[in-house]
Amino acid sequence: MQLCNAFLLPQMLLKHFGLSASHAGFVIFPGAILSTLLSRRVGAMIDERGSSRMLRTTPMLVLLAAVLFAGLGTHFWVANVFVYMLMNLGFAIISSSVSNEISCILPSSQLGSGTGLYQLMQFIGGAFSIAVMSSAMEWQKQLPPSQTYANLFWGLAVVAAISNLCAFMYLRRIAPKATSSSSS
């Protein structure tokens, strides 16, 4: 979903709002800087609170951002500065939490393979989502641009909701293991 958003947001800024490429870059830039500046704090939060706790709450942040993109971002270009910051922060926390979770679950002999597989899944998912979004843009070319982009972001909100459900199910499954290991 992260790569899909990195594709979709510039398209919307250029084609719907008529911004130049450099202005679109300035809209996206604060989100990139924010996740860079907060990366140490994100790592400390994960170490302090645990990756499973972060995976319980942070997907809601991404869902909220997708809904805000669909509702506000398609009407006010300046809203995208703040919503992208929110979404980028959510992705940074989730990505770091999943990497940490992988390192806790897998034995050290499988850690390189597991991390590599996770990265591969991210790139394949990103490429697939971009292909789906570009096709969906083409299918909706008869609609006004604001409606087209709102539909696409609502679609991303559905994906985020499914991700929240998956995170909930995963955390529910590992909860009994965590309580049994902490009681021994």
Image (tube, rainbow, N blue to C red):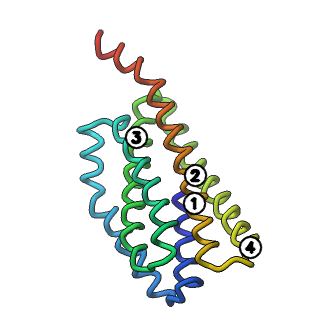
The residue nearer to you, when weighing 39 against 20, is: 20
Badge 2 marks a residue whose secondary structure is helix
Cβ–Cβ below 8 Å for labels 1 and 2? yes
The residue nearer to you, when weighing 176 against 141, is: 141
**Residue under circle 4?**
138
**Residue under circle 1?**
154
**Residue under circle 3?**
55
Q: Position of residue 37 (x, y in %)?
A: 27, 63
Give the CA distance from mark 4 to mark 2: 20 Å
Q: Amino acid at mark 4?
A: Glu
Tell me which numbered mark, 3 or 2, is placed earlier along the sequence.
3
Disc number for residue 158: 2
Give the CA distance from mark 1 to mark 3: 22 Å
Quarter of the image for residue 141 reads bottom right
Q: Residues within 10 Å of mark 3 (few under 14, many from 20)?
A: many
Tell me which numbered mark, 3 or 4, is placed earlier along the sequence.
3
Q: Amino acid at mark 1?
A: Trp
